[in-house]
Each structure stands twice: as structure tokens, then as C-alpha cells.
Image (cartoon, rainbow, N blue to C red):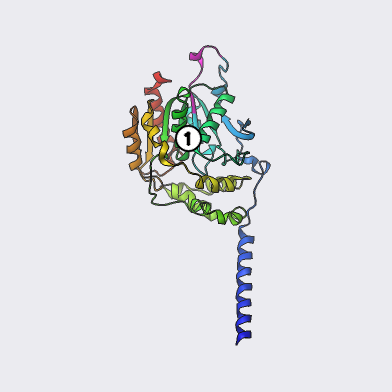
Amino acid sequence: MTQYLLKATVLILLGAIAVLMAFIAKYWAPDRTIAELKQWQLPNSEFIDIQGMQAHVVQSANCHTHRGDAAEKNRPETIVLLHGTSASLHTWEGWTKALSDQYCVVSMDLPGFGLTGPYVDESTRYSSENYAAFVIQVLNHLKLDRVTLAGNSLGGKVAWRTAALYPERVNRLILVDSVGYPATPKHIPIGFKLAKYPMMSPILNRILPRSVVEKSVLSVYADNSKVNDALVDRYYELTLRQGNRQALSRRLNETDDESDQAQIKQLDIPTLILWGAKDDLIPVENAALFHRDIRDSQLKILDNLGHVPHEEDPLATVDVVKQFLISESGNG
């Protein structure tokens, strides 16, 4: 009997190993280099040296108009767009196209995401304060002084933190489903759930089922029909950029505490708050909290849109942005 149990145990273990090996073989997804991800560079992409990183930045044509012109009034206003967790500057392509005729539009891949990749100095925390410092260094490199900052989710928090820490550099804010207040998500993307467990890193840094990324994207859209293969491919492939998976795990485990929340009430600049009514990650009730605490703010709730309304329906959302920019043009 003992010999029989031993043989059975060995067979079970061998079967489990075989299943595991098959799973790994099917979903094996090693890191990819910048060269291997070249298709995600845009025609006007550039890489600039920030803190030893090659930060991926895109400027619209208007940004080069009157560059260095001593007459400030001749320079087009600048709008800087900041993406959220696991996204990239590509999330703003709809807004960029709609705004570029009139404005200098700048977007960037934040550290740990897109083609920028992780901080070179591994001791640097993925905190909103450090992200704000990164944004200011990009602005300095591009010789941009005062700007309108727009951000979604994590990028929203980076935007308002930048405005709080460097008020002389930000004249207006646009917060899109922004992080800022405690939130109880109705649904957390599965990719975020897995990345929060450091013990999973050795596996997650080597394998990545595309279905995990697809489910994560579906969870931030209200209309699933808008999530196509090309969109999922972009999120999936940029997640594979060298170091991004490790950085995501750190980012999710190095979240800010709530001590900086008090800075929201100190903001005293024109602010547009946009929110998807069907946001399952940060509930729409948080939009009202921003509107309550920022004195000079406007609130627009967008029916039938989710956590990334600017990406899900760029035309409808950018129309609201244009109205805001025109109404507040005297503050630029």
C-alpha cells in the first residue's frame, strides 16, 4: 500500500509539473527592448534624458512655434497630458489631435510605464511627489514655463500634486477620474490584483496571458465594444517593456498615504473635473469631493463612460475641455 501511494504521489506531482510547464510555455512573455517596441513610437516621438532615464515625450507642432520668442503673448498655450497606471501617452491621442491646431500639446510616458520604463535609481519611490518632480524636469528640459496640466487616474493625482508643490508652474488643472480621496472600487483590474503580490513577481515578470490585459482594459471601459484587438495589443506590448512589470508591482505597493489630501483644498486655480459616471475603479462620488474642495472648479459628469473617458470617447470629452479652456483663457 505504501509503495502504491508513493507511485500515485509521484504521478500527481509529475502531472502538476507538466501542467505548469505547459502553462509557462503558452504564456511565456519575456521583457521587450525599446527596439522591439519601436512600433509604439509616434512620428513626433523623442527621448530626453531625465534622471538618467530616456523619457518618451511627444510635442505637437505648435510647441515649436515661437519657441524662444521673447514675447510671451505670441506663444501658444501649453497643455500637458499625464496618463494613469499601466497606460501610456497613447491614451491621449484623441485629445492631442483635437487640441494641436490651437495649443502646444505635450504628453509623456511616466516612469514605470510606456516606453520610458522604470527609474534608473532603484531607490526612487514611485510616489506622486517623485512623479511631480519628474514632470517639472520634463518641462524644464522643454523650456516650458506655466502650463495647463491634465491627468487621468494616477496622472490626475500627479497633476494636482504638481500644482500644489510647484504652483508657479501650473495655471489650470483638468482632472479626469483622478486619484485623490479614499475609494472602494467596484471592480479592480485583475492585472492590478496580481501585481500587488511581490511573491508573484518571479512568475509575473516572465509570463503574461494577453487575456489578463484584455480583462483589465475591459474593466475600465463602460462600452466593451470599443475595446478592440489593436487597443489590447498596445496595452499588452507596452506592459512588456523592460522593467515595467517590476515597476508596476512597486508602484502598487508604494502608494502614497492620505496625508497629502489636505493639499487639494489649497489649490486655487481654475480646475475642470471630468468623470465617467460608470467608473468602477474610482466612484463618481469622488468627483463631487474634488468639486467641493477646489474653490475655482467646474464639474462635468459624463454619462455612459468609464474610468478612461478621454480614451473611450475623446470627441465628447475634448469638447468639454475646449469650452473650459476658452472660458478660462484669461488665466493662461
Q: Quadrant of the N terminus?
A: bottom right
Residue behind mark 1: 158
Residue 274 versus residue 187 in the image, above or below = above
Indicate the position of residue 134 as horizontal and vertical percent values: 55, 32
Q: Position of residue 265 (x, y in %)?
A: 36, 31
User: Could you tell me if residue 209 is visible in this image?
Assistant: no
Using the rendered view, name the quadrant where residue 3 is placed: bottom right
Q: How many marks?
A: 1
Camera-side residue of 37 and 272: 272
Magenta segment includes 207: no
Residue found 33% across the figure and 33% down from its top: 293
Magenta-colored span: 69-79
As drawn, 140 above or below 278: above
State the residue in front, 129 or 314: 129
Up/down of 109 relative to 75, above or below = below
x 38%, y 51%: residue: 186
The amino acid on which the numbered mark 1 sits, given as a three-letter code, is: Val
